[in-house]
Amino acid sequence: MSKLKRSYLKSVLVIAIFLIMLTGCGSTQSEPEGELSLLNEQGEEVTLTNKERATVLFHFTEVG
């Protein structure tokens, strides 16, 4: 009987952990509602959410 209780407890814990993970990952309110903007080469502010004009964004990281 002890083996059955342990198995039941393990399955309940796995399901609980899975549900907690889904709750944390599924939230749509975590993203900021403001506009995302950066400065271009001329120092002008460019919004990345502008639907009228396409924006190409390059991200460089230092290697080595």
Image (cartoon, grey):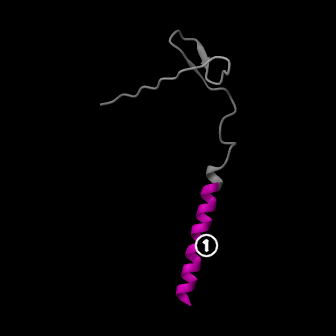
Specify the quadrant of the image occupied by residue 15: bottom right
Task: Please identify the residue farthest to the left as the structure is shown.
Answer: 64
In the picture shown, does residue 64 fall above or below 54? below
- Judge the density around disc 1: few (<14), some (14-19), many (≥20) Cα neighbours within 10 Å: few
**Residue at x-position 53% and y-position 21%:** 56
Local SS, label 1? helix
Relative to 62, 32 lies left or right: right
Residue 43 percent across, percent down from the top left: 54, 11
Instruction: State yes or no: residue 20 in magenta.
Output: yes
Specify the quadrant that holds the N terminus.
bottom right
* Residue extending furthest toward the top: 42
Quarter of the rendering occupied by the C terminus: top left
Query: How far across and how far down the image is residue 11, in percent?
Result: 58, 73
Q: Is-magenta flag for residue 4? A: yes
- Magenta portion: prevailing SS class: helix
- Residue holding disc 1: 12
Question: Residue 23, position in %: x, y?
Answer: 65, 55
- From this view, report whether residue 58 is shown above or below residue 6: above
Seen at 54% across and 88% down, the residue is 2
The disc labelled 1 sits on which kind of residue? Val
Q: Position of residue 9 (x, y in %)?
A: 58, 77
The magenta stretch is 1-22
In the foreground, 42 or 57: 57
